[in-house]
Image (spheres, rainbow, N blue to C red):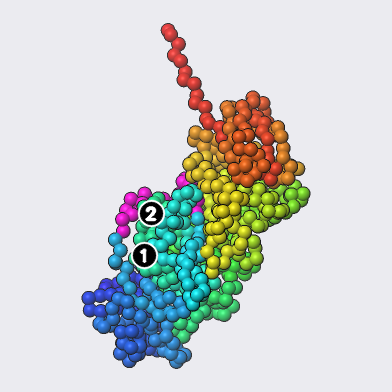
Amino acid sequence: MKYNTKAFFEGREIQAYKYFGAHIEKNGVTFRVYAPHAQTISVVGSFNNWDDTKNVMKRDFQGIWSCTVKDAKEGDLYKFRVKQASGETVDKIDPYAFRSELRPNNACVVASLEHYKWSDEKWMSTRTKGFDKPVNIYELNLGSWMKGDGTKEGEIIEHFLHYDEIEKNLIQHCKSHGFTHVEFMPLCEFPFDGSWGYQCTCYFAPTARYGTIEKLKHFVNALHKAGIGVIMDFVPVHFVTDNYALRYYDGTPLYEYDKAEDAYSEWGTLNFNLWREEVRSFLMSAANFWLEEFHFDGLRMDAISNAIYWKGNKDRGVNEGACIFLRRMNHLLNVAHNGSIMLIAEDSSDFPGVTRLGSDGGLGFDYKWDMGWMNDTLKYLAMDPIYRQWHHNKINFSMAYFYSENFILPFSHDETVHGKATIVNKMWGNYNDKFAQARALYVYMFTHPGKKLNFMGNEIGQMREWDEKKTCDWFLREMPMHDSFEKLFMELGKLYTKNDAFFEKDYSWESFKWIDADNNKQNLFSYIRRGSTKDFVVVLNFSTNAYTNQQFGVERKGKYKEIINTQWHCYSGTIPNEQKQTCQAIKLEKHNMPYMIEINVPALGATIFEVRHQKPKATQKKEG
């Protein structure tokens, strides 16, 4: 294969995997690896009985080692036996391997990417970043969303299901709940189940846990044909310290920073040296690999604040080299995919311009998780309602900064683990109070500007924290409170995806208007979402008091019809379903608006009213 390595060494290569790694050719398999400080490298594997004298690699002047093994074939196991700069000999994985053994084994496997024929051309040709479309993301861990049952020595055990075994159920679930996209926690190969894939070894190999390369491609293809976008978590900041992987690959810090104080992360992993051009090409090629070869529609980039600032610490200053890498990666990926992919930053910092173009001084991401909204909202709802009046700004503050970035509102896996409690369990009060507030919370989430993300289990009001060893508590659907909670969740998903008021001008001042953001005495918040044919009035009551005949200013005259009330009986509330409110707007100025409506507001609840736009009367021509 003819390949110009210039771009690789300049840190602007996004297809390095097409040259490095193991490639099946007519005369065998050609192996290539970059390890400039190694003394010797041999390919060892099942094809040569792991004998390092049979297939010794040759080094070129750039530090790239290669050899062709005529006896190697698809499915063979292999590693690189590296005599490092220190003289120590270590068996290392191929950093560009397309396949790996299932843990605890870790040998690479010779594999081809060419066996599957795609049929998602229509989807791929029409997909967009979704700025003016509904984006309702379902985040899940494939290993624990649904598990298979089996027995071993008389004991019931759960095991991983493969892509084809959950495909139909996942598509049906997304369709019924109004999820437009799925987001999978990392699918790169990783050794420890408890890292959830965020501590990777093979950046170009789909984990063996859930099936083959072909099964994953078919899985993505099926989701696309069902109209569902596919996003994957990608980890460009840090990697595992296991000695068989990237750590001290050739006996020197080839992938990690030189200084230990920069190299080791807070998670006990190693930070990528994002200043080094070869590392930049490696990571950009890995990101592109999933977009190009597996047709993923976007990547959610993990721990971006730890790239922006040295080890995520603002006091240590901006990591300029890492920021250059992020700008370059986002730009090159967008160019390669005609601007149709979604690049999402999981960033908890206040660094400006994360979703601004790199050419304008930003980092070039399309979206950023709004961690501030998530933290403020959940802290507010954990408080006793008596004290909420003094923390009113935890709710209304989000719109003060919202238009500074393209935000996604996340209730992710991080909010349901490690003693944090699940979303429902974070709410103040007893069992009934928790669900009442959680229902109001989800009205707030789905009607607040910004795209949405929920982790699996949120939709059924799961009470148990997520554990990667266990499947979701789907049995909760048999309990009335959880069944009705899921019903509301589904209704909100439908409302959100079917009405352009909630998504078409998400990042424009035109789509949102406060009615009253400052009613802290009653713990009330009210606002309008404007659409092309209908407007929606949303009232949130985070007080234990119900309010009757409460007056709100509105912009339009007409009949206002209540379409959701979180305290209706059908959602396990206290108000009969048939008591749906309708009211005519009165020509009376209220909240600096020309009209006024008077409604009843439920305690610890939320209500949504819709009003259709009135068509202007046709002007009649006078007879001459």
For the N terminus, the image quarter is bottom left
Upstream in the sequence, badge 2 or badge 1?
Answer: 1
Instruction: Pick the residue in front: 278 or 453.
Output: 453
For image coordinates 55% across by 40% down, the residue present is: 511
Q: In the image, is 345 to the left or to the right of 592?
A: left
| Distance Cα–Cα, label 2 vs label 1 | 14 Å
Residue 464 shown in magenta: no
Horizontal and vertical percent for residue 312? 59, 67
Horizontal and vertical percent for residue 435? 65, 51
Callout count:
2
Q: Which segment is the magenta one?
A: 118-137
Please name the predominant secondary structure of the magenta segment in the image.
loop
**Residue with the most extreme front position:** 154
Horizontal and vertical percent for residue 393? 69, 49
Can you identify the residue that label 2 sits on? 224
**Residue with the most extreme right position:** 386
Can you identify the residue that label 1 sits on? 215
